[in-house]
Amino acid sequence: MTQEELFKKLVAHCKEYGFIFPSSEIYDGLGAVYDYGQNGVELKNNIKRYWWDSMVKLHENIVGLDAAIFMHPRTWEASGHVGAFNDPLIDNRDSKKRYRADVLIEDWLAKQDEKIEKEVEKARKRFGDSFDEEKYRATSPRVAETAAKRDAVHTRFAEALNANDLAELRQIIIDCEIVCPISGTRNWTEVRQFNLMFSTQMGSTADGASTIYLRPETAQGIFVNFLNVQKTGRMKLPFGIAQIGKAFRNEIVARQFIFRMREFEQMEMQFFVRPGEEMRWWQQWKETRMAWHRALGFGDDNYRFHDHDKLAHYANAATDIEYNFPFGFKEVEGIHSRTDYDLGRHQEYSGKKIQYFDPELGQSYVPYVVETSIGVDRMFLQIMSAAYTEEKLEGGEERVVLRIPAPLAPTKVAVMPLVKKDGLPEVAQRIIDMLKFDHNVAYDEKDSIGKRYRRQDAVGTPLCVTVDHQTLEDNTVTVRHRDSMAQERVAIDALPALVEAEVSFRSLLSKVKA
Ligand code: GAP
């Protein structure tokens, strides 16, 4: 199965099992907007909890905030979003399809990397045990040629982005002979800038309505509340403010399911530090955030850092944590050193002093900011991509299992009476009543036990508890584990401790360096 086929299956699975539906589907959906179903909302809430607890619970110097989506329009002038929150877009005249020029080039660069990796793999097979990968990479003329071509384009690309040179971006697309995936032609328009912010009106027109924006990032709600939180919380630098909330971007090219949406959710933390200390904190937060991702156990090699080719208007350092999605390594989270740009600009535009008095230095200054910013939906897709597994079982049977880390699973335990009679459903209900105050528990009495296991595997339930006739005699049940499919006989009284040990956030959080 190709990665593309796998991804298609994953998208279908998300719908079939109540994780994700197209928004307003009965009206044929709305581009790049999605709804989360009964299982999706649970997984999403658990992702948010994992993030929130790792920030706010594990750090004494990080507190939370929930700012409004609507903000004073001057906010977005000060932040630079009105002037500079643009994507370069290009159209193919034959297919009439619109693309992000930078993404077309990034995809071309990624293809060159793939070409190099394929060469290396071919050589590995050819040379067998005697293969010296380092030497091969350094000496193979084919690898050298592709790498040189790639690096030259990469340099041009970074320079064009930083100089905002739209004509050069187009020229790179032409020179690299990039074709439209739909029409297959190179009949490209000029590259134009496109502002990504959605706007709407506040107040009635008669009253003199004003244009306001749907926030394109949650961060600005944190910046404008910096003094409120610092003063009322008596916070001392360094300290952080964490927030989870919706953000909106009129994405030109919304592809790959929930990877790029027009309405999405962000989990952002702004960490305020002394000027001059930002690089140390940026390094520290890179490590902490990477540990948070790797603690999920999806394989360390599937994550990597990727430094930005173009720094945003507010940043002096920026890197992404990328995950190896079925469609290649792509950004899940950004870690940005935002200098004193935002607080400084809000100070300038509002006319209000936004400074911190540092008692140790005996002076006031505008703090610097290191931000960690991750999309909830993108994290959701990352987990689903990593968790979706098709397995062949003994006897030729197949199962689809979502290997979602147990604390994040939508349902933690499914309780199943072997038959719908003889008092077994009543015992199952008593077990549910015992567990439901602490965990999401499901009841399932339909079909054979095998079919019921398959249903729970498909939504990632880590534990199934079967009540049978022996239960009536000795108060024991069968516990079946999702990943190993191993079964054990356990006393009903022992269930709360067993479930807790398997699904608690404690073990997951303790792997994250605080
Ligand atoms: N405050 C900084 C900021 O917003 P960003 O790199 O534009 O930085 C941060 O976005 C994260 O938000 C991304 O790494 C991604 O996970 C998520 N994100 C951004 N745009 C998105 C979109 N259109 N759909 C889904 N997630 C998105």
Image (tube, grey):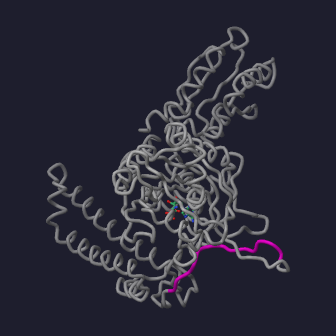
Using the rendered view, name the quadrant where residue 194 is placed: bottom right
Q: Is residue 46 left or right of residue 61?
A: right
Using the rendered view, name the quadrant where residue 378 is placed: bottom right
Where does residue 353 sit, x and y in percent of width and height?
54, 62
Residue located at (61% from left, 42% from top): 46
Residue located at (68% from left, 8% from top): 474
Q: Is residue 236 left or right of residue 82?
A: left
Residue 456 position (above or below residue 351) = above
Quarter of the picture holding the C terminus:
top left
Question: Which residues make up the magenta segment?
Answer: 192-204
Residue 493 sits inside the magenta stretch: no
Where does residue 105 sit, x and y in percent of width and height?
41, 76
- Judged by its main secondary structure, the magenta piece is strand
Q: Which of 266 and 45 is in front in this view?
A: 266
Residue 260 position (above or below residue 40) = below
Residue located farthest toward the right when viewing the structure as drawn: 206
Residue 25 appears in the picture as rendered: yes
Where does residue 494 sit, x and y in percent of width and height?
61, 16
